[in-house]
Amino acid sequence: MPTKISAPPDYKPKTPETLAEYLSCISAVAATLGGSPQDWRIAEVGDGNLNLVFIVKGPKGGVAVKQALPYVRLVGESWPLPLSRAHYEHMALTEQARLTGGLVPGVIHYDEIQALIVMELLEPHIIMRRGMIAAAVYPRFADDMSTFMARTLFFTSDLALPADKKKAMIAAFAGNTALCKITEDLIFTDPYRVADLNRWTSPQLDGFARRWREDDDMKVAVSRLKLKFLCNAEAMLHGDLHTGSVMLTPENTRVIDPEFAFMGPMGFDVGAVIANFLINYFSHDGHEEHPGQRDQYREWVLTTVGAIWTSFRDKFLDLWRAHGTGDAYPASLFADGPGKAALEAERQAYMERLWADTLGFAAAKMIRRILGLAHNIDLEWIKDADLRATCEARALTLARDLMVNTRSYGTIEAVCDAARRIRHEIRNY
């Protein structure tokens, strides 16, 4: 972690007042907004952990502006963070747009000195996490997210790329070390030790937190996952792919905020999505007005998480069969009938390994959101602390079993069945 704040001399954090003048000098932005700066309405709306986010509306249209701060906004200036993360976000958005088309916001302008990206304004989209807390149904999401993950992960892997291009991508993202370090500490390390930034629902979950620090089986399992995160540069990851990084309507999905992007293990992205759906599943006991009110929605959550994995797996395999031209598994080695059969068997085995990674990373993501620094509002917004702790205890129980007994879960259906069982078995924290 950097020890002091660092920024170029010309870097200035924007305010609604200074942003208008800045944007007026960018012709593409001014044309999008229309009118003059005096006609524009600007609001700072950032509710995340790291950045400034502005919504700008003019007579003709609107834009979203995201500017990195030289520190972690959630914590303050005591935790410096490099502005270069905006560079990696812009690079990832560009690559994701090339691979997935309209599944990410369009970039209108990028300013490296100001660590600032101007993007299309997504309206009437909302943050998915907020919609799911309100029990909103998104019928397109499983198809859209599985497409996003299959295409971004497959086409940036050795299954599709020649080795020189893959290594160039590794080099291009290798400098995003500060944000990787956040992941390495907050997800794979801090929840399993005494750490100043850890927090949980206390005193209700004090026993869980203590047991996590004493559980050697879990510490070995999470350390194996951390090693994969450190070493396995399989594909370009979004790096923070949760329901707070999705803006959508029932008809349209956009993935946002890839500032944690780097070349890493594919299961980390897939597991992050699954983890956030499982957390949401357990949270609804704290949001419904009477028991059973959200039973139908809970089942939609589990049905959707099943469709996400199944569709991702099928699409990834289809891409491999059609576009497997990378330096891994050279086609010349599998040209005859027996070779093709052997390669197809290996594809299935590859997906089984990816599934195991996905479950482990999902478990780590669930745990960090309950015992670590940054929590999910799915659970945080449950006002009754005892009820919140019960929901969290259920999620932690499933997460530990997924991490330590991964081989017991051969299918996504087995995971969903376990979630249902644990919800009914654990009545109090």
Image (cartoon, helix red, strand yellow):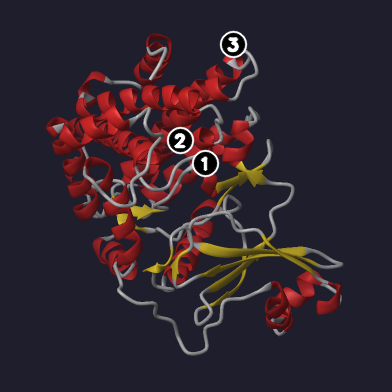
Looking at the image, is mark 1 or mark 3 nearer the viewer? 3
N-terminal label among 1 and 2: 1
**Residue drawn at 53 percent across, 79 percent down:** 114
CA gap, disc 1 and disc 3: 24 Å
CA gap, disc 1 and disc 2: 6 Å
Looking at the image, is mark 2 or mark 3 nearer the viewer? 3
Q: In which quarter of the image is residue 57?
A: bottom right
* Residue 14 percent coordinates (x, y): 62, 76
The kind of secondary structure element at disc 3 is: loop
Pointers 1 and 2 in contact (C-beta within 8 Å): yes
Mark 3 Cα shell of 10 Å, populated few (<14), some (14-19), many (≥20): few
Indicate left or right for 136 with 425 as reference: right
Indicate left or right for 256 with 60 as reference: left
* Residue 376 percent coordinates (x, y): 48, 40
* Residue 299 percent coordinates (x, y): 54, 17
Task: Give the labeled residue for mark 1.
Answer: 243
Q: Which amino acid does label 2 sit on?
A: Asn
Q: In which quarter of the image is residue 251?
A: top right
Task: Give the labeled residue for mark 2.
Answer: 276
The kind of secondary structure element at disc 2 is: helix
Mark 2 Cα shell of 10 Å, populated few (<14), some (14-19), many (≥20): many
- Against 323, residue 362 (above or below) is above
Closest to the observer, 374 or 87: 374
N-terminal label among 2 and 3: 2
N-terminal label among 1 and 3: 1
Closest to the observer, 301 or 388: 388
**Residue drawn at 36 percent across, 20 percent down:** 415
- Against 265, residue 298 (above or below) is above
Residue 292: assigned label: 3
Closest to the observer, 350 or 57: 57
Is there any visible trace of residue 325 in the rendered image?
no
- Against 46, residue 341 (above or below) is above
